[in-house]
Amino acid sequence: MTSDEGRARVDSWIWSVRLTKTRALAAAACRAGHVRINGERAKPAQVVRAGDEVRLRHAGRERIVVVSRVVRKRVGAPVAAQCFVDNSPPPPAHEEIAVTGRRDRGAGRPTKRDRREIERLRKN
């Protein structure tokens, strides 16, 4: 019989330490190739151990964390912060994020007034 101490599924661990809101989102990120363990693409059921580097592309930024403690159940934010070392680059400032004009799907071509507003947004 093998011992499972110090090991957990990567999708479960990502959810447990609050890097994603739901386990389903964590599993979907794994299936889409947005999760890497020690440089290799990870499937949702892949095992993560203490010392592994986990890279997660989520919500428009890349999170780089080193596992310091393995948990299987979702824990509170103070405990979750102790479960990994965050080596992520700082998030971009709100001023640096480009504002793009968005139209509702099926709204058709922009009117002349809409085009002027889009041009005004692009200049700023």
Image (spheres, grey):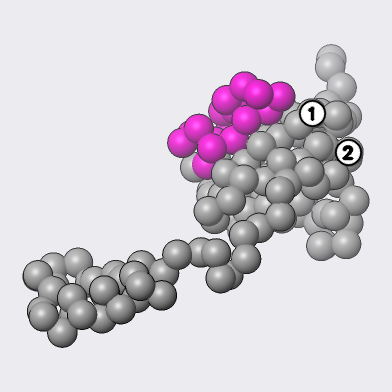
Name the kind of residue labelled 2 in the image: Ser
Residue found farthest to the bottom: 113
Q: Does the magenta segment cover residue 108?
A: no
Q: Nearer the viewer, residue 96 or 107?
A: 96
Kindly state the secondary structure of the residue where label 1 is placed: loop
Counting other residues with Cα less than 10 Å from the Cα at mark 2, is it few (<14), some (14-19), or many (20 or more)? some
Q: Quadrant of residue 21?
A: bottom right
Give me the residue at 85% from left, 55% from top: 81
Q: Does residue 111 appear left or right of residue 9 in this picture?
A: left
Is 117 in front, or is 33? 117
Position above or below: 105 against 85: below
Q: In this image, 31 relative to 44: left or right?
A: left
Quadrant for the N terminus in the image: top right
**In the displayed image of the protein, which residue is found farthest to the top?**
1
Name the spot of residue 56 as percent of width and height, x first.
62, 41
Q: Which residues are magenta?
A: 29-44
User: Which residue corresponds to mark 1?
Assistant: 52
- Residue 65 higher or lower than 104, as above or below: above
Vertical placement of residue 89 versus 119, above or below: above
Task: Please report whichever mark, 2 or 1, sits nearer to the chain's N-terminal start.
Answer: 1
Above-or-below relation of 111 to 122: below
Q: Residues within 10 Å of mark 1 (few under 14, many from 20)?
A: some
Name the residue carrying label 2. 68
Quarter of the image that includes the C terminus: bottom left
Residue placed most toward the observer, 57 or 122: 122
Determine the residue positioned at 67% across, 46% down.
Answer: 63
